[in-house]
Amino acid sequence: MAIRRALAALGLVLATVATAHAGEIRVMPINDHVFAFYDGRPAESSVNMAKATWADHGANFVGVATYAVIDGSEALVYDTYPSVTQAQFVRDYLAKRGVRHFIVANSHWHLDHVGGNAVYADSSVIATEKTRAQLIRHKPKIKDGTLQGPPAISPFKVPEVGITEPTTVSVGRYSVELRPVNIHSADGLVAWLPQDRLLLAGDTLEDTLTFIAEPESLAEQYRNLGEMKSWSPTGILPNHGDPAIIAKGGYTTALIDMTRHYIRAMAEHAHDKDFAIQPIERFIPAELKAGTVSLWWAYREAHHENLQKLATYYKNKPLSDFGP
């Protein structure tokens, strides 16, 4: 299936070559039509953990990026941050560059990726049908702040368009292929830019490591990551990663290899007696040494949660078969 959006192209908007700063959000031109907007990743010493919310633990502390593909008056925005305030910055920035027509794609249903959807009340928002179902189901609790605790997201917009198979969206002269994937969560949606061979990866990949949201499908996710590597991207742009690497054009496929290694090693050792106390370094030593990823402080909490999830999931189950 392909949904084609062909809006009037008024000429290419050229990006500045330097990273711009406005408040907390950094604007990073990847090339002349792809932009990253990056917020968060504060030093550990600067945060007050007692006041941290779901948005801090899941996004702001690890660092959070959203992306835009633009051409003239058109833009596709990939994810909308945890908050309306952050999303409004992105929309205002693009509007100042002459964008008047927006399409939004949500990578999956987790709140740090959809919190600013209401900023695009006048625009189409696309997600997988599984994302739509989750957000419709949870909308009352999202709006009153009881799903994950405060802050509540209100107003909140559920995507109007749900897809179940690869879907192509046109942004002026550029094509964006929205590809459903079961990686990280069953409702995942990555964006493939064939003309650039860039992959907007959502939460399918992260630096330092992936949040294991759905341990029951890790073996399938492992295989799907292998399939994603076969696309041979020249740059991978995750929503949570090192801003310095994102600003330089993204990660190599070594990030995919690292993620596969991490989830497989975690699952295969879930029955170890000392599993629950093993540090990150136990599972990805080679990748840390090679600099494929860096050890960011906020991911120690994520790793601890991953250990707990897998220990609980595999407690009375055989370990998953990942194959050769």
Image (cartoon, rainbow, N blue to C red):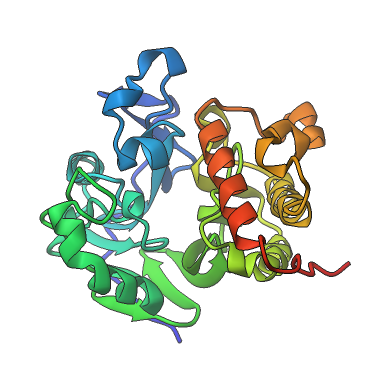
Quadrant of the image containing the C terminus: bottom right
For the image, the number of numbered tags is: 0
Horizontal arrangement in the rendering, residue 188 relative to residue 271 (left or right): left
84 w.r.t. 146: above or below: above
Horizontal arrangement in the rendering, residue 86 relative to residue 31 (left or right): left
Residue situated furthest right in the rendering:
324
Horizontal arrangement in the rendering, residue 53 relative to residue 281 (left or right): left
Quadrant of the image containing the N terminus: bottom left
201 w.r.t. 29: above or below: below
Percent position of residue 155, x then y: 10, 56
Percent position of residue 61, x then y: 41, 31
Q: Quadrant of residue 72?
A: bottom left
Using the image as rendered, state which of residue 180 and residue 137 is in the foreground.
Answer: 137
307 w.r.t. 140: above or below: above
Percent position of residue 116, x then y: 22, 51
288 w.r.t. 148: above or below: above
Q: Is residue 39 visible?
A: yes
Using the image as rendered, state which of residue 80 and residue 281 is in the foreground.
Answer: 281
Tell me what residue is drawn at x 32 percent, y 20 percent: 48
Q: Quadrant of residue 97?
A: top left
Q: Is residue 5 visible?
A: no
Tell me what residue is drawn at x 29 percent, y 46 percent: 82
Percent position of residue 234, x then y: 66, 50
Tell me what residue is drawn at x 23 percent, y 75 percent: 160
Tell me what residue is drawn at x 76 percent, y 54 percent: 271
Residue situated furthest bottom in the rendering:
1
Using the image as rendered, state which of residue 11 and residue 124 is in the foreground.
Answer: 124
